[in-house]
Amino acid sequence: MVRHTYDCQDGCPVESTLQIISGKWKSVILFHLIKNGTERFGDLQRQMKDCSHRMLALQLKELENDGVLVKTIYPVMPPKTEYRLTSFGETLVPVIIAMEKWGRYYNATHREEESSQA
């Protein structure tokens, strides 16, 4: 996939970021790699129950192609595949942690709203 360098107007740097981490599962994958370091495919799949095998493989491949993570395949039976962030991928840590923090805030706020409406 061809990636672009956006430098045109306000918001373009956000587009640059989103072209790498957009997609329902990429940020979640990055979150698990940040929290746990190296992850095996099966472990990611167990942690992301609503993500299909095919979608997880696709999102991992895109992150690998973008240089955000590295895939290591061990020559054992059954095959063992591990993923970890690259140094480039580690630059996304503050972004993903900020998303986690905001998501916790949203969840807490949303729960309070639901409680007050009940």
Image: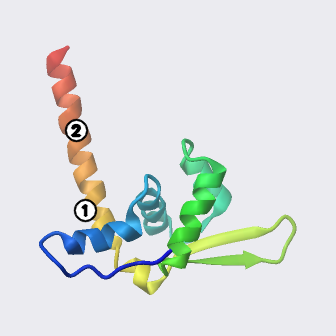
Amino acid at circle 2: Ala
- Residue 31 appears at what percent x and percent y? 42, 61
On screen, residue 46 versus residue 92, left or right, reads right
**Distance (Cα) linking label 2 and label 1:** 15 Å
- Mark closest to the chain's N terminus, 2 or 1: 1
- Residue 60 appears at what percent x and percent y? 56, 66
Q: Is residue 94 visible?
A: no
Query: Compared to 97, does 75 lie above or below?
Result: below
Quadrant including the C terminus:
top left
Q: Is residue 81 visible?
A: yes
The tag on residue 98 is 1
Amino acid at circle 1: Ala
- Residue 52 appears at what percent x and percent y? 61, 47
Say which residue appears at 21% left-offset and 82% top-offset. 7
The tag on residue 108 is 2
Task: Identify the element where label 1 is drawn.
Answer: helix
